[in-house]
Image (cartoon, grey):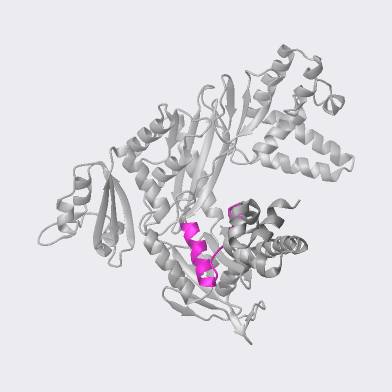
Amino acid sequence: MIEKIRQLPNSAGVYQYFDANGKLLYVGKAKNLKNRVKSYWRFTPSLHPNPNLSARILKMLSQTRSMEYIVVDSNEDALILENSLIKQLKPKYNILLRDDKTYPYIYIDESKPFARFEITRKVVKGKNISYYGPFPSGAKVLLDSLYEIFPLVQKKSCLREKNACLFHQINKCLAPCEGKVTQDEYNHIITKAKEAIVKRKIILDYLETKMFEYASNERFEEAGKLRDAIESIKALSINSNIDLANDVDLDIFAIEVDKDRGVIVKMFMRGGKIISSSHSYFRHTEFFDVNEAYKQALLEFYTIDTPFVTKQIVVAHSFEDKEEVTSTISKKLNHKVKIIYPQRGSKVQLAKLALTNAQELLKQNISKESVESQVALLFELSRVPYRIESFDNSHMQGVATVGGMVVQDEGKWDKNSYRRYELNAKDEYGQMKEMLTRRIEKFEELPPPDLWILDGGMANLNLAKELLKSAGVNLDVIAIAKEKLDAKAHRAKGSAKDIIYTSIGTFELSPIDKRLMWVQKQRDEAHRYAITYHQNKKRKQDIQISLLNKKGIGVATVSKLINYFGSFDKIQNANYDEIKAVTNKKIADILKNSS
């Protein structure tokens, strides 16, 4: 390794440190690869870590046995590549924040006559568009409330109808479709609605009055819905007496950590008032690095599709790569952005407010050791798993072979992330390989979780580890094999003695052990999801087989067609000559010439 370090170029790039087993330990970026990497080491009397570095870095370097690097054209390119590799490969000594979701905005395009407010998560093309937000939650509630209070055009289709509809009859619309309101009068209503989005007390006062009216008339279900809407709108913002000049727009970021958890607080100030805020937790180890945390948080949040980005971003801590992150975000968005670590004035108060809220959020989440922490400790996982993907496959004698992946995130099922797989392999090992390979291929688009749980034994565990090693990804894996009683899988809750296979050995825990029950819960949800998909697919295939049988095509011929084409859809889309080549002219005539 010493020769490779001495021969490093004076170029921008990304470097990677590996341990003796080829496991990726760390990914870093550099303006000058030679200078940056050499700063980690001392060369006499032999290569050893620089003793002036932090304990965290020294621990990582003590395990380092090899290094690789990638040269790029600019420091900004290095920053982007570093962030991408950390997300995809999950190095042991880099922190990994949760993926930032795109937040919705409310927008209006006033270049259109009788404009409407709508929700978007991306930039909308138009000449006279105003954005309000972002709203991490409650955007739909806020939008629905606008249409409840103000007599706006309620539906996109309304203006096309040319006739006043029910909305006009119940005083929810002024019927511009019949010319019953002028453009100027309508624009005046739009102005008041815009004010209400920012000064939300207007909306809250109306909803509270309506709620009490419903309650006094014993319309409790409707009153309850309004109560929930009020709470949702109130939750958008952090309460603050800090108001700046009316034209000031700011995004404020604060990151705070305790011994094993961290939280990112984001506050969004528009027109001098905080209009919304959000927070997200992440788990970390002793390897937390404030520079990495802010880099990831900012680069993940600001994308080319972000509808509106302030010119000033306030951060609660200074960090090493602030200038590079500023330059990268500015180039990405094609307009100048300034990242500020304030030293005085009202912006310092905003940063302190965000930090105070972060500290309070961490206090709220201090509880006894979680089962996830206990699982990580027992199985010696590299990190506490807050996001878990579990896999299972299902078939019946090779028919309707499918796989399922379920996802748990912070103790809740993330059903939007569930995935179904149609599988072609004939044996269960091959099916698992096919499913995991397809998931790995999507890591760049959808980064890996903290833990994989596989249905199966040691063979599946070794398979997953080999596939991940080939992809260069650090990801903990465990497998769970169902207890067999009389050659049948035994799933009785509270008594099943399932076996857990890990990288450090095999575990047979008590049936009432919370750690076993936690793993079983993940496995059972994957099994439920996969078998439901299998049953639906099998039912559909049975119907299709029955239809073919009625046309005079026997079971053996159907099997031959399925084995060749792979699915009924592909049989249906095959041409006459293909079917004839697989079977015969008679079958081709039946399938392609019969009605």
Residue extending farthest right: 217
Q: Is residue 336 visible?
A: yes
Task: State which quadrant residue 401 falls in.
Answer: bottom right
Q: What residue is at 71 percent from the left and 67 percent from the top?
A: 554
Q: Hey, which residue is sitting farthest left in the picture?
A: 45
Q: Position of residue 464 (x, y in %)?
A: 45, 67
Task: Looking at this view, name the residue that lies furthest to the bottom.
Answer: 486
Q: Nearer the viewer, residue 279 or 187?
A: 187
Could you say where residue 73 lies in the image, as x and y percent from the top left? 28, 38
**294 relative to 523 in the view: left or right:** left
Q: Quadrant of residue 497?
A: bottom right
Residue under the image location 82 percent in, 16 percent down: 178
Q: Is residue 163 above or below residue 83?
A: above
What residue sits 29% from the left and 39% below the top? 75
Measured as percent of width and height from the top left, residue 354 is found at 49, 41
Q: In the rendered view, would you say 188 is above or below 276?
A: above
Taking 205 as reference, is 292 left or right? left
Membership of 210 in magenta stretch: no
Does any portion of residue 412 appear in the rendered image? no
- Total numbered labels: 0
Q: Where's the N terminus, which quadrant?
A: bottom left
Q: In the figure, 72 relative to 182: above or below? A: below
> Which residue reaches farthest front?
585
Q: Nearer the viewer, residue 531 or 64?
A: 531
The stretch of residues the image draws in magenta is 411-440
Q: Position of residue 14 (x, y in %)?
A: 29, 47
In the displayed structure, does residue 472 sit left or right of residue 99? left
Judge by depth and name the residue closer to the eye, 315 or 448.
448
